[in-house]
Image (cartoon, coloured by chain):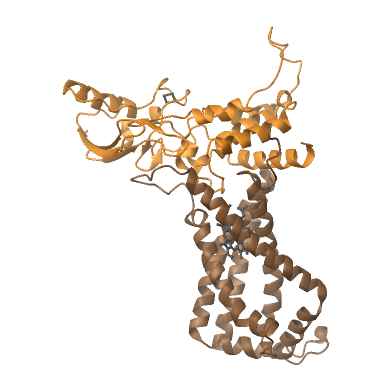
Chain colours: A brown, B orange
Amino acid sequence: MAYKKGLFKTSVGRKNLMAVTGLFIAFFLIIHLVGNLILIIPDSWFPIEFWGGVESAHDMYNAYSHFLVHFWPITLVAWILYISIITHVIDALLITLNNNKAKGDKYQVTDNSTSTWYSRNMGVLGTVIGLFIFIHMAQFWLKYKVLGTEHDLYELVVTTFKQWWVVLIYEIGIIALGFHLAHGVESAHRSLGAYPKGLMRVIKYIALCFSIVMAVLYAIIPIIIYFK
Amino acid sequence: MNLTLKIWRQEGPEAKGKMVTYKVSDISKDMSFLEMLDVLNEDLATKGERTVEFDHDCREGICGQCSLVINGQAHGHESHYTTCQTHMRSYKDGDVIFIEPFRAKSFPVIRDLKVDRSSMDKIIQAGGYISSFTGMAPEANSIPIHHEVAESAFDSAACIGCGACVATCKNSSAALFLSAKISHLAKLPQGKVERMERVVWMVNAHDDEGFGSCTNTGACAMVCPQEVDLLDITRMNYEYNRALATVRS
Ligand code: HEM
Ligand code: FES
């Protein structure tokens, strides 16, 4: 008997990879958010003693981004992140293709009241997020980290967000992210087998709060910069 | 009451099917859904037409034979009911009712509304059992089981294998059915002996039968006539990962 079909080959096993990579990306989102909240610290808070008497958000943000580029553990985490995103997408495609094969003929009438729209459309939401990540990386990561054509990251970010259509694209991406997380984080814990009833109740609640907080905080950054 | 029925008709497994419209009249609200179909079939038989084929057996919600997707929902819109327990008082005069077979690649249509659900039997055959000596029933108190554990195992064991979970799932996954049996046996001492092998064998069989992968939308648990808990799927995932992590090939 082919006992072990491999951890990632069965319908159940494959979800592990989806869950682990998804949760790692979600963890990254926290760090990424904290760094970018520097952008919207009000001027009146400066100078900040705790940060060596830093004078402005401009200096603080650039010091922070300089640190990111030159601190090797961050580089390591970044590589794990890139691999996670790619793995997550490929695994999502494999699962979706396999699920489409399992489907029978279409129903004439479908009643979708038994599940949420975002849990049924994780692939669509993920694709929107994927397109967003693409644009996002081209705007900042490529120019600052890869090509090195921009050195003042704060300046680059602020001028980028002065264009209304950039803000719009970000809002769309972030709303999609919020819904993707709202199902994804809970689902990931289910996929990994966090089965005790009390534990799942807590996870469900935390996952929902996490998604809302992430989406709201990410969403206000471009808007605040635009109107500043 | 008078109703318009739009029913899936298909001559055989290979034939192309289509929705056909029928009118039924003088339906009593006390009839069950299947009795309403019986009335239609009597009409058709009287006119010399081929009757509509559908699965049923006990007609009291215990055998899991009845099926049907009614207005887009497996077993109709009354949650946690089988089709045989759904009554016509849930409908009103003049309603248009769409009636379709359970659909999934692993549930090929045999005729009209009848589908072949033997793929689910194959999953059970792969490991949904315990090995024990036959003979006299053992003394009831020889294996003490905590009341809550027994109740929880019983909730999982309540699955009647109707396949509504598969019919409803956007991925045609049988995860709820599969996990109900795995959870049922994993919770009890009698199931512990084959605990590791069972989950791997049954998951492999599930995939070999062509069912899809669960994405935890939860639609299955919402239509399940026996209210099997979505947590059973989570429990199965745990059992599966545990088995892969601990067992040598
Ligand atoms: C880059 C484009 C992305 C695509 C195409 C994508 C696609 C998908 C799809 C199709 C699913 C559902 C599959 C399933 O439930 O098995 C999923 C689940 C998930 N996604 Fe994404 N996603 C993307 C980005 C992200 C991002 C940025 C995050 C985190 C912030 C994320 C976190 C998750 C999590 C935690 C799950 C749940 C895993 C599970 O159900 O076990 N995804 N993704
Ligand atoms: S006919 Fe037995 S459950 Fe409906």
- In the picture, measured across the screen, residue B183 lies left or right of residue B167, that is right
Asked where in the image residue B144 lies, by quadrant, the reply is top right
Asked where in the image residue B23 lies, by quadrant, the reply is top left
| Above/below status of A94 relative to B238 | below
Say which residue appears at 57% left-offset and 81% top-offset.
A222
| Above/below status of A153 relative to B55 | below
| Above/below status of B116 relative to A200 | above
Say which residue appears at 71% left-offset and 31% top-offset.
B197
- In the picture, measured across the screen, residue A166 lies left or right of residue B132, that is left
Asked where in the image residue B180 lies, by quadrant, the reply is top right
Say which residue appears at 64% left-offset and 54% top-offset.
A18
Ligand 1 resides in the quarter of the picture at bottom right
Where in the figure is residue A116, as x and y percent of width and height?
49, 53
Residue A220 visible somewhere in the drawing: yes
Say which residue appears at 20% left-offset and 25% top-offset.
B49
- In the picture, measured across the screen, residue B52 lies left or right of residue B148, that is left
Where in the figure is residue A152, as x and y percent of width and height?
69, 91
Quarter placement of the N terminus of chain B = top left
Between B220 and A124, the one nearer to me in the picture: A124
Where in the figure is residue B240, as x and y percent of width and height?
69, 39
Between B164 and A85, the one nearer to me in the picture: A85
Between B232 and A122, the one nearer to me in the picture: A122
